[in-house]
Image: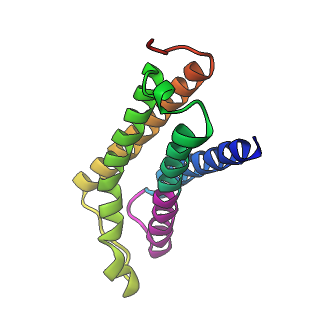
Amino acid sequence: MYSSALMAFLHHVAAFTVVAALAVEVALFKPPLSLTQAQRLVRTDTIFGASAAILLAVGMLRVWYFEKGPAYYWHDAFFLIKFGAFLVAALISVYPTVTFLSWNRGLKAGVAPEIPAGRTRSVRMCLMLELTAILVILLCAALMARGFGYLQ
């Protein structure tokens, strides 16, 4: 019983960390970037990725071992949409991460990145799409919690 509550707690901490890190990325990504801003973006994106991985791992542990079991969740339309939105957001997040990681050599040399306008628009669009996916996830979580979406 306590282990289920602990897993729920870890799941929520990871989810809030994902949202907070993404919000920080949105706030920091305002080119032209200073060296400090770019370094913070790289660090924040690392936190974002690690917390998303923890969120996925803990979520899957909850599905398989700590809650109602996989037979229940894989028959819930809102769980499937929620899981799909998470996977889509994860795939979308690759582009900003690759962009941020491409700055590492310059950052180590003390040089702030110069980001072309097209790349800026693309990264910004990815961040906004990730935030949109989070809204979908939150809606689905609320509907799941109230018993909607179960396909018998």
Rendering colour mode: rainbow
Q: Is residue 100 above or below residue 89?
A: below
Q: Which residues are magenta?
A: 30-50
| Coordinates of residue 119 in the picture (x, y in percent) | 25, 55
Q: Nearer the viewer, residue 128 or 136?
A: 136
Give the residue displayed 69% in from the left and 42% down from the top.
4
- Quadrant occupied by the N terminus: top right
Q: Is residue 74 above or below residue 122?
A: above
Q: Nearer the viewer, residue 77 or 115?
A: 77
**For residue 90, side relative to residue 62 (left or right):** left
| Coordinates of residue 10 in the picture (x, y in percent) | 65, 50
Give the residue displayed 62% in from the left and 40% down from the top.
66
Dominant secondary-structure state across the stretch colored magenta: helix
Q: Is residue 102 above or below residue 2?
A: below
Q: Nearer the viewer, residue 89 or 42?
A: 89
Q: Does residue 47 show up magenta in the picture?
A: yes
| Coordinates of residue 29 in the picture (x, y in percent) | 43, 56
- Quadrant occupied by the C terminus: top left
| Coordinates of residue 75 in the picture (x, y in percent) | 43, 21
Give the residue displayed 54% in from the left and 54% down from the top.
21
Q: Is residue 40 visible?
A: yes
Q: Nearer the viewer, residue 138 or 119?
A: 138
Q: Is residue 27 visible?
A: no
Give the residue displayed 35% in from the left and 60% down from the top.
97
- Residue found at the very far bottom of the displayed protein: 109
- Residue found at the very far right of the displayed protein: 2
Q: Does residue 40 show up magenta in the picture?
A: yes
